Amino acid sequence: MKILPIRIFRWIEIKLNKVRRMIIVLKPKTKKEDIQKVVEKIKEKGLKPVEFQGDERIVIHVLGKVTDDMPAPFQSMECVEQVMRILKPYKLASKEHHAQRSVVKVGDVTIGNGEITVIAGPCSAENEEQVMKSARILKEMGVKIMRASVFKPRTSPYDFQGMGIEGLKLLKKVGEKTGILTETEVMDVRDVPIAAEYVDILRVGARNMQNFDLLKEMGKIDKPVILKRGMAATIKEFIMASEYILMNGNKNVILCERGIRTFETAYRNTLDINAVPLLKQETHLPVIVDPSHAAGRRDIIPAICKAAISAGADGLLVEMHPKPEEALSDGAQSLNPEELKKLLKELKPVCEAVGKRMSI
Amino acid sequence: MKILPIRIFRWIEIKLNKVRRMIIVLKPKTKKEDIQKVVEKIKEKGLKPVEFQGDERIVIHVLGKVTDDMPAPFQSMECVEQVMRILKPYKLASKEHHAQRSVVKVGDVTIGNGEITVIAGPCSAENEEQVMKSARILKEMGVKIMRASVFKPRTSPYDFQGMGIEGLKLLKKVGEKTGILTETEVMDVRDVPIAAEYVDILRVGARNMQNFDLLKEMGKIDKPVILKRGMAATIKEFIMASEYILMNGNKNVILCERGIRTFETAYRNTLDINAVPLLKQETHLPVIVDPSHAAGRRDIIPAICKAAISAGADGLLVEMHPKPEEALSDGAQSLNPEELKKLLKELKPVCEAVGKRMSI
Amino acid sequence: MKILPIRIFRWIEIKLNKVRRMIIVLKPKTKKEDIQKVVEKIKEKGLKPVEFQGDERIVIHVLGKVTDDMPAPFQSMECVEQVMRILKPYKLASKEHHAQRSVVKVGDVTIGNGEITVIAGPCSAENEEQVMKSARILKEMGVKIMRASVFKPRTSPYDFQGMGIEGLKLLKKVGEKTGILTETEVMDVRDVPIAAEYVDILRVGARNMQNFDLLKEMGKIDKPVILKRGMAATIKEFIMASEYILMNGNKNVILCERGIRTFETAYRNTLDINAVPLLKQETHLPVIVDPSHAAGRRDIIPAICKAAISAGADGLLVEMHPKPEEALSDGAQSLNPEELKKLLKELKPVCEAVGKRMSI
Amino acid sequence: MKILPIRIFRWIEIKLNKVRRMIIVLKPKTKKEDIQKVVEKIKEKGLKPVEFQGDERIVIHVLGKVTDDMPAPFQSMECVEQVMRILKPYKLASKEHHAQRSVVKVGDVTIGNGEITVIAGPCSAENEEQVMKSARILKEMGVKIMRASVFKPRTSPYDFQGMGIEGLKLLKKVGEKTGILTETEVMDVRDVPIAAEYVDILRVGARNMQNFDLLKEMGKIDKPVILKRGMAATIKEFIMASEYILMNGNKNVILCERGIRTFETAYRNTLDINAVPLLKQETHLPVIVDPSHAAGRRDIIPAICKAAISAGADGLLVEMHPKPEEALSDGAQSLNPEELKKLLKELKPVCEAVGKRMSI
């Protein structure tokens, strides 16, 4: 095979301490001049091509620092059949980057260190009475972090849109009065610094998982961020989204699996339980599960909470409303206080069965 | 309720001992003659129409024995906007039909009565040595039922297609020698009675979940049947498929969730953990989970097995191969004997945490 | 219809000038006091309950002004099996609201009036030479609007992120020099007013379809907005997103189908061709198709462009790069100038076959 | 790099006239003895390993005749990160195997040679009058092939199951009387030879696309077979299914895209229009489209029929019922005779616009 000079291989043997990340498969019967064009283009980019010839196809290994933009120009060449990448595209989130598991601390709560953290509360903050009541109920049960949205991403502009900044102030007030930590979603980049002043944990909702400007702003604050998986986001895209926050300086990222959109209509979403062990394996970040959005119906929530913990989740983000039947949003998927209490009790032995403990 | 004249309700109470199952919504501004046509058609079918008029749309309730074929002719009428059904379409599988949970017995094993049943074994029966070895390994661990396919549904006709009827005989032989119970998939209607002679449990694979002729044949045998969910089958379709077996006379049906096809490519399928509590709630049938096909990769199988049990599954169908690296099929998702042993040990406390016990 | 006392209908006819939008199905054997609770709750909300009793279930029609928040509190009641809505949730976008088709004008181009508008250009603005060259090539072919992104939503933070505001200025300059109209994506709410000064049409990308704050800002400008469908957004959610822009005052909204995420991996997305006629039927807004993202591979783009036009689309949004093999993004799905020219020529008879004309 | 003996490369240069189809990527820091195990296993299978070493990972190319079973044993080895295949898995269906497009002939109709073939008729054969009436209506319009199912794959066992073998006889009778060609679905392997006697074209339904025993039987008859894509089948699986028929001896296979199952609920399925040009490009088989199942609603059928033809389809499989509002199945998606007539007229210019002609 004349096209493969022995020199090349020696060069590989001797010099090649670089990451090899791309393999280009050419179409059968590609002409020499076309192969040459591919080879030239690889070289132009400062990379090293290594050709391999079978009887039907030529495969070129590209050695060197292959960036994420590189496959594209080759994919569009007429003679190229396939371009394959080998190494993983994420860095800061990967376990290879950071071998120890990350532990996120907020107040006296630690997430990701073997204790199961339950974050619970109403879908939306509706008024002072409801928020205060929720906080007291939760404190009494031992729940240390309360969720409550004040900016609501609603499919319809005619639905309740949340209390807004008034809600942020209310959360702060309730936090101070009751000692509960607070968690809320931020949707607008302009609200990030304000929310970071008023609440303890910020959340990026599923619809904004790839709102990259929001992710960047989240990277600039010093409060922990819960990043929810987009409803059609792959695991890879999910981890890449966390990378946007991490690379902007905020290391306190918590991944939250909350169900994906599938063909099934019996539930609001389908909880992707496979994601839990895989995210734990691929990243060093804590992983929690939101069973409320994953189910969208109250009846199966206890079962999937147990499943989440057993699969390795570090915590839960559960909707609880003092009176679900009066909730302004998501009542159908909110537990009432008794149901949550019962659930917490049932979760205890499950936590222990997988070597963890409840933080309650 | 003053707004509703008492007579209406009396009429319903007295006359209407029928199932009401259909609501027809007409388009705005439907003409009187068109309404009349809908009404006439309802009557022709021996049903009772009850009109309700708002200011924009007329809604007609159809009372009487509405069969599954009935919505269609109305849906295709020009003036009809929507036809809605109300009652559930399945009967024999529903908890309303059969309030007590069904327990399937095979040999000295019972499935669905609080004991977790683990069915394990190689994806395919490959040869006598491999099957015998698998059986012995399993028996030693306390596993009482061995899975092993002899008819293989392979995407490619060029892949290993299974041992066929020779494999059935081998399973019988191994069962007799070792005392293990055997389970295998049947794909061809013509093989159902033969397989029923040789093995203890028959399986309908995911690709055949809506092979209705196969389901009917499965309804005619006296061996238990494991029905796997189709990879894009809704919960409703899954339960309806079990109905085909039940109505043909075989009451020993076990539902098996094995992952659904979604956009995610990190795993072979996405385990639909929501389905476990929902199937338990909607039907009286035992529900098991196949983590091997749901994951398609060995590394996350232990985690999702624990999740399945915690979510309420009655058992597991797991691939184990004496030497996964030599398996003729599905090696990447097969546990090796040590991994299975470790998993069984880890599952024990999880079973107990949810009030069940291992049958091992 | 003897079975229904006339009085009922008179009562409905006379009193009921309200939209009826909700039907509540109760579980079998619901107790009288529970029914009463549902009825009371309906009344508290100022609505009228109308009960219907079959032999197994009670159905309550709720008459009056049912808002989108109302089903939730009922869904979460123990005795409620199902809550169904009847009318459509969108208003301003619906054909019922606005019977005539909307036509969007920009410069001397009209979109939605029977002329097929082709918007073409590079995925990203990369530098002045490339943008100027693209504009000249397009003008020469008769293409009047050039797309070019300056803010890039990239899965990876390590990929090219776009030229930013410099790019906006460049687009304005190129527009002035060549007379071409310009179109670009905006991702950050803070960039909306700036972009509206520099370019002729703004775009909301698929990842931001439910970035509601961005939609609201888009509603406040006086430039046309192309709203791309989210990759897992339903038709209903897509139309509801347009409603956010419309209700904030901007009537110049163009819907863009760009492929949805499915299990299929042979293409980047799956073009949802069904959506084209359905969106045209449900709304009065112009509908265009982006074949480049829907395919993600150049080879099938011409075929699906023809399909889009035949199905009723008002235009196309196609990626063209002077040298696709050198593109910094999306090279694999960009046509080169010759391919675009050939496509435009082939599209002409297709446009005519469905009673439209090319604006070229 | 000591692990890579120069000899290996010479051997490649000189000897390697084989298909190279597999690349094995090892995990970082794989030990020498583990690499050796992989290498040994490759050699045991009669294949040639060629190692490539970067600084993080070793990649082994496997040269020789790699069968579809081979990746599995490597995937399950602890030290293996990824196994990639390169060549396409299908053979007989590929254009590389058979460069000319296949044309299927039935009676005086040819499918795949530039004429658009419309196959139309009722979802189900219901009775002699309906079938005869349908045939006469179709003949009068110039439609030469009538579809009508006699074996019905119904989700519910309580729905109409079809006329069965009586229906086959009826189709033959109607064919003889009217001169129309007939097409019907077969679900049970035992019915294949019988159906092949009575009708002109046999159909494999979407639910049976991977009923491999049925595919094999279809390969043994001498009548053309329409193979419908499974509702969650990838393009690759679809083509592989056709391979089962082709390799059993029947070369007259027609592929039928009929919509795939996605998250969208506005239509019964989502027509995958991308599949049309891709199937034409990858295979030499004729490709038709079933708009009726892809839409599930009559209103958008004309639009997507035009789209299908424009995208390159060779024909359509459309449901038409003399009286859709009385159909025993699928009435909502059946055109009535006037609608079909209008559609055929509108399709004519579309066919011509893409260089084809109507066979009517």
Image: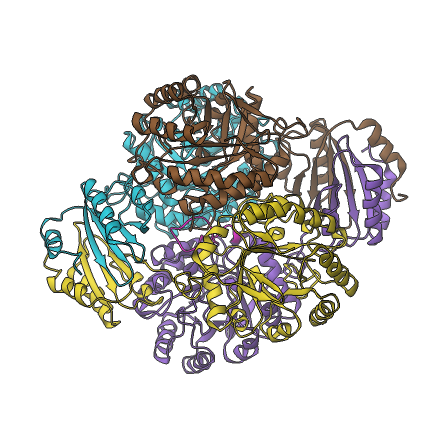
Chain colours: A cyan, B purple, C brown, D yellow
Chief SS of the magenta region: loop
Closer-to-camera residue (C162/C87): C162
Any part of residue C201 in sight: yes
Left or right: B122 as drawn, with respect to A330: left
> Would you place residue C231 above or below residue B206 in this image?
above
Q: Is residue B88 inside the magenta stretch?
A: no
Closer-to-camera residue (D240/B110): D240
> Would you place residue D191 above or below residue A36 in this image?
below
Relative image position of residue C125 (x, y in whole percent): 34, 29
Left or right: B294 as drawn, with respect to A280: right
Relative image position of residue A182 (x, y in whole percent): 42, 28
Relative image position of residue B250 (x, y in whole percent): 62, 70
When asked about the image quadrant of residue B67, the answer is bottom right
Give the residue displayed 20% in from the left and 42% down from the top.
Answer: A65
> Would you place residue C182 above or below residue D150 in this image?
above
Relative image position of residue C356 (x, y in whole percent): 59, 35
Closer-to-camera residue (C178/C36): C178
User: What segment carries the magenta color?
Assistant: B261-275
In the picture, which quadrant includes the N terminus of chain C? top right
Any part of residue B2 in sight: no
Left or right: C189 as drawn, with respect to C46: left
Closer-to-camera residue (D312/B197): D312
Q: Is residue B269 inside the magenta stretch?
A: yes
